[in-house]
Amino acid sequence: PASEQTTVLPIDPERPDPAALALGGQLLHEGRLVAFPTETVYGLGANAFDDQAVRRIFAAKGRAANDPIIVHIANAAHLSEVVLDTPDIVHALAARFWPGPLTVVLPKSPRIPDSATAGLPTVAVRVPRHPVAQGLLGAAGVPIAAPSANTFTRTSATTAAHVLEDLGGKVALILDGGPAPIGIESTVIQITGDEVRLLRPGAVPAEAVDAVLAEFGLARATGTQPARPAGSRAAAGTVQEAAPALSPGQMLKHYAPRARVLYFEGPAEPARAAMRQAVRDELARGHTVGLLLCHEDGPLFTGLVSGAEPPGQLAVEELGSCADLAVIGQRLFAAMRRLDARGVDVICARSLPTGGMGLAIADRLTRAAGGNVIHVP
Ligand code: TXA
Ligand code: MG
């Protein structure tokens, strides 16, 4: 249906109510859409075996038809329902990371409709850890195709309120299990024979994947394939037409707030200085500015408002200690949405170390900036 009556149902994230899960499972069987929390972000789910239902996901999100969707299963025993065969390395990765935020791309089973994979011969699969996601998979009894529950190219939803904001009237049910605990999407890897490639950095650190590969004498194929070199906004505008995308998580203009994002990449000291200057310049032009800061940077950005500007010209989101990337990742998307809600013209952020979760944070900020990466030597 073009328009749905959206029900938001609170659900205990630890011990989800079986009746609520059963309702979700029944709606999925009817071919309708159910949004639910995973440990990473909220997902917009449909029965993965139901072509029409999967198409409804694309319509609801305004998602480009060349952007394939992750299929969620309850455990590795269900892999044979969705992929052609399971190489040993996948069993090893599953044993180490499932349930959890690792997605593997493998040759697809014919049971998975082409709509879910955007016509690709491969399907992305993961086993989510969140009890509500697990419970919904159990109640549905089918794999659940679910992209992040946000409007296409926008910041992923980490709360039920975010889902409602983007998809109210387009989804039958939102299971509200509180904030998504990790806040950054899964790591996506593609496995082709012996070649393993990182398609999207995410909540499982690339180093942790490498450790399992090393046990098999394998090394990850080099490069995280950043969409394209940091470049013009024009380049960003063309990526949606590039079809079919290898992995559209690679699209440059993705995870983007409405505001223009300036991302300062480089060593801490010069990056902070360049960012301070840019903030001054933007304020002087009369723009409202939002800052995504780690706690230690806070004091450096006080005193930038002279008093001549209208009140509220500067909005600050402190994400947590620069050293605690897990906390920063958990809060990042929600903070971008809050700055957007305040209507800021520009959002400024600087790069942090890229170890562990840092690689995913850098990736999301780069894409949020849609090419506006300012490299500071
Ligand atoms: O944490 C997550 O992964 C969340 C939760 C809901 O599970 N889902 C999510 O889905 O982030 P989505 O659709 O927003 O991102 C899926 C990513 C995209 O980068 C997409 O291009 C890639 O996975 N992908 C899906 N199928 C693929 C395929 N067959 N080949 C290559 N990349 C694929
Ligand atoms: Mg997404």
Image: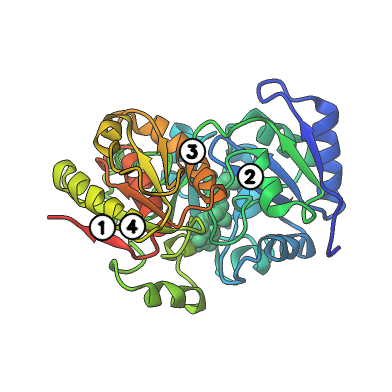
**C-alpha span from label 3 to label 1:** 22 Å
Horizontal placement of 333 versus 287: left or right? right
Residue 321 against residue 224 in the figure, above or below: above
Few, some or many residues within 10 Å of mark 4 (<14, 14–19, 20+): some
Query: What residue sits right under mark 1 in the picture?
Result: 222
Percent position of residue 349, x then y: 33, 48
Whole-number angstrom distance, CA of label 3 to CA of label 4: 48 Å
Q: Earlier in the sequence, mark 3 or mark 1?
A: 3
For mark 3, give the secondary structure. Answer: helix
Q: Is residue 241 left or right of residue 325?
A: right
Which marked residue is nearer to the observer: mark 3 or mark 1? 1
Residue linked to disc 2: 162
Decide which of 377, 143 is in the foreground and name it.
377
Taking the image as shown, residue 201 lies to the left or right of residue 168, namely left
Query: Is label 2 in a helix, a strand or a loop?
Result: helix
Disc 3 target residue: 94
Query: Mark 3 packing: few (<14 Cα in 10 Å), some, or many (20+)?
Result: some
Q: Is the residue marked by circle 1 packed among few (<14), some (14-19), or many (20+) residues within 10 Å?
A: few
Amino acid under label 1? Thr
Which marked residue is nearer to the observer: mark 3 or mark 4? Answer: 4
Amino acid type at image mark 3: Ala
* Residue at horizontal 45 percent and vertical 43 percent from the top: 311
- Where residue 81 sits: x, y (%)? 66, 51
Q: Which residue is mark 4?
A: 282
